[in-house]
Image (cartoon, rainbow, N blue to C red):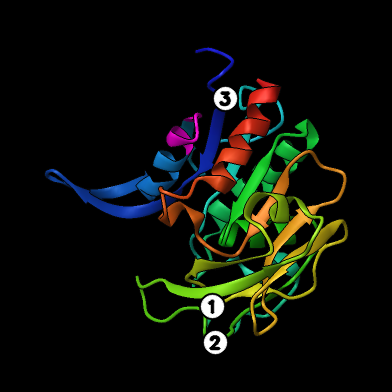
Amino acid sequence: MSASEPVIGISTYLERTRFGHWDVEAAVLYRGYLDCVVQAGGTPVMLPPVGTWTSETIAFLDGLVIAGGADVDPAAYGAERHPMTGEPHRDRDDAEFALVEAALKLDLPVLGVCRGMQVLNVALGGTLHQHIEGHNPAPGVFGHTEIEVVPGTRLHTIIGSRTTVQCHHHQSLDRVADGLHVTARAPDGTVEAVELEGARFVLGVQSHPEQDVEDLRLFGDLVDVARRKA
């Protein structure tokens, strides 16, 4: 593999899955993440929520994506479970917290998508709103919201001051962790993006850029920064 093809790890999740003659638990990931990394010039590697993730075991990566998915266990930020909060997936929570810790230690470029942004915030000591309205029209249906981006931020450089994004979430950032800066909001005030102070590239977005493989701006910037490490 050449240095022009940075290796981008993407977190996955364990789900009951049917394929061929089989109905088994499997490590799965929406294909859009893979396609976006490939089309941006990277090589994707799927990282399951099993085993031990440390700075040593992910040292082969040039960048990391924490993918979207289920609600983070509120116990991770010292809260009681809200009636609308989904059942915990502690194996995934633990694996992704470990991935974030290891990536920050290595100064890897990190992109957190939806749940991934929430994982980043909780891993650094922040908390979440466990239920909000208006950003999740129906199960499996993406909504759209316009976001306003803070000038002078990395996200502003990537996508400009205002854009419409796809969303599918019922939780959002509450107390933002120390070191993270809010770089975009929705019209109702929902935090739509954060960046980590002092990092080469640590960016979380509440939206789902992997749903549009024609718009590679976020994944492209991640891969470009990762390529410089590679």
Figure quadrant of the C terminus: top right
Residue under numbered circle 3: 6
Q: Are marks 1 and 2 in contact (CB under 8 Å)?
A: yes
Q: Which residue is at a point 80% across and 73% down the rendered structure image?
A: 175
Element type at mark 3: loop
Where does residue 133 sit, x and y in percent of width and height?
Answer: 54, 87
- Is 64 displayed left or right of 195 in the figure? left
Q: Residue 40 in magenta?
A: yes
Instruction: Give, as a single range, the part of the protein colored magenta.
Output: 37-43
Q: Amino acid at mark 1?
A: His
Where does residue 59 sit, x and y in percent of width and height?
Answer: 67, 24
Q: Amino acid at mark 3?
A: Pro
Of residues 44 and 55, the one drawn nearer to the viewer in this rendering? 44
Where does residue 15 sit, x and y in percent of width and height?
Answer: 36, 54
| Res 60 → quadrant | top right
Mark 1: few/some/many CA within 10 Å (<14, 14-19, 20+): some
First of labels 3, 1 by sequence position: 3
Q: Is residue 115 above or below residue 95?
A: below
Where does residue 17 sit, x and y in percent of width and height?
Answer: 27, 52
First of labels 1, 2 by sequence position: 2
Residue under numbered circle 2: 133
- Is 40 displayed left or right of 123 in the figure? left
Of residues 111 and 186, the one drawn nearer to the viewer in this rendering? 186
Residue under numbered circle 1: 170
Element type at mark 1: loop
Q: Residue 25 in magenta?
A: no
Q: Amino acid at mark 2?
A: Glu
